[in-house]
Amino acid sequence: MGTVIDGIQADVSEGRLVAGQKLTVEALTRQYSVSRGTVREALRRLAAEGLIDLRFNYAPRVRMFSREELRSVNEARAAIEAEAAALAARRYATSDRQREFEALSAAIEKAALEQARETFLSLNRALHDLILTIAGNPVIRDFARQLQLQILQSQMRQYDSSNSFIPIAQQEHRKIVESIRRGDPDAAAAAMRAHLVRQTELFASLPESFYSAEE
């Protein structure tokens, strides 16, 4: 069962499954060479975690945030990740993840310059996750993981197929990275909060089609 759960989570995170996409027990049974019962139980667990939407008489599908859910998620992110950025700035000088942080910062900068959309989206998630790790607070990290941010990213993948968001997002990332690097917790928190508040405002402006999938 763990293989099915891990596989679906990875497929959503990496864009092979997108928000609102229907799943079938039969296809998953073939894909993972497991029984229908194993697949059903895996889907129930993923539904309990908020990744899969299970409704009576409807095919299971990858969850899609409603407008209100997305607003709530982004407000929570702004609070949680701003504090994580501040903690990361305080602890960066003694962190054993400095080399990884610098390599990831350079990689996302390169992806932004090359307008490599999928690489940028993947590295964006990795950067936010690494900041949560450097912050060194497992409670904050667990709260952030419960927000199912891969769904948000999956929804965005479908709506905006252009790369217009990349320069603005990377400019904001740069401020966050530089603040953490120089050990300035107030600046790091402010930069992260501004980054996520702008994202909240962007999502609030999107049409209703962004929040619904075809039945």
Image: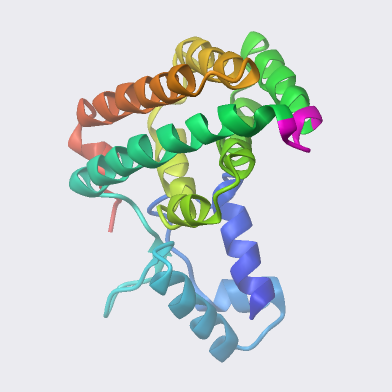
Q: Quadrant of the C terminus?
A: bottom left
Q: Is residue 199 above or below residue 142?
A: above
Instruction: Identify the residue at horizontal 41%, vertical 32% (top origin).
Output: 82
Q: Quadrant of residue 5?
A: bottom right
What is the basis of the colouring in this image? rainbow
Q: Is residue 124 visible?
A: no
Q: Is residue 64 visible?
A: yes
Q: Quadrant of residue 165?
A: top left
Q: Quadrant of the N terminus?
A: bottom right
Judge left or right: residue 139 versus residue 65: right
Image position, residue 32 (x, y; %):
69, 74
Report the magenta residues as a range. Answer: 94-99
Judge left or right: residue 107 versus residue 201: right
Image position, residue 208 (x, y; %):
19, 38
Image position, residue 12 (x, y; %):
54, 52
In front: 189, or 73?
189
In front: 194, or 15?
194
Image position, residue 27 (x, y; %):
58, 72
In front: 204, or 137?
137
Judge left or right: residue 177 versus residue 172: right
Instruction: Identify the residue at horizontal 45%, vertical 11% (top origin).
Output: 168
Q: Is residue 87 above or below residue 173?
A: below
